[in-house]
Image: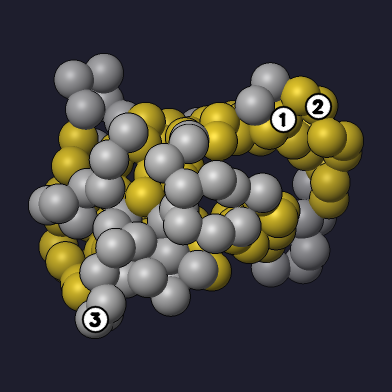
Amino acid sequence: MAVVKDLITVTDDHALNFGDYTLTQKTKKADFMFEGDLYKIKTYNTITKLEKNGMMVYESVPGTSVHNFKASDSMVSFETEGMNDAQITLELEPEKEYKVYVDDTNIGRMKTNLGGKLSIGLEMNAGQPVFVKIMKL
């Protein structure tokens, strides 16, 4: 996998690729249209944040690159990579329970807070993608 040099792109199978954790200065791209929604990406080595129609979708600290990001009402899946371990926060449905998989290993059930935020810590090795799948129960 590699960083996303255009900051955000669409794959052939209608998934999103976004983020560039190698940048040393914050870089933004706004008004990216995908499936009728407007996306905005802010990314660099300290943080990567994706918003859809003004609402947070994905945030990582430090910054990451994300490939094959797909989200539906019942599931979110993506591959991510970065230079260091990362804290990933997703905005999902408020006060719902989700089953979380990291590299096809079930790491347990997690419940979102009142704002719908779900946070997971990922151990990362530079250049090695981590696959994440989150399923609503």
Give the mark toward the camera: 3 or 1: 3
Q: Which amino acid type is shown beneath numbered disc 2?
A: Asn
Q: Nearer the viewer, residue 96 or 84?
A: 84
At a point 83% along the width and 50% down the height, the residue shown is 111
Image quarter for residue 89?
A: bottom right
On the image, numbered disc 3 is attached to which residue? 25
Q: Is residue 41 above or below residue 32?
A: below
What separation in Å lies between label 1 and label 2 (alpha carbons)?
4 Å
On the image, numbered disc 2 is attached to which residue? 106
Image quarter for residue 116?
A: bottom right
Q: Are marks 2 and 3 in contact (CB under 8 Å)?
A: no
Q: Which amino acid type is shown beneath numbered disc 1?
A: Tyr
What separation in Å lies between label 2 and label 3 (alpha carbons)?
36 Å
On the image, numbered disc 1 is attached to which residue? 101
Indicate which disc, 2 or 3, sits on the residue closer to the N terminus: 3
Mark 2 neighbour class, 10 Å CA radius: few under 14, some 14 to 19, many 20 or more: few
User: 106 left or right of 8?
Assistant: right
Q: Which mark is residue 15?
A: none
Q: Is residue 120 above or below residue 2?
A: below
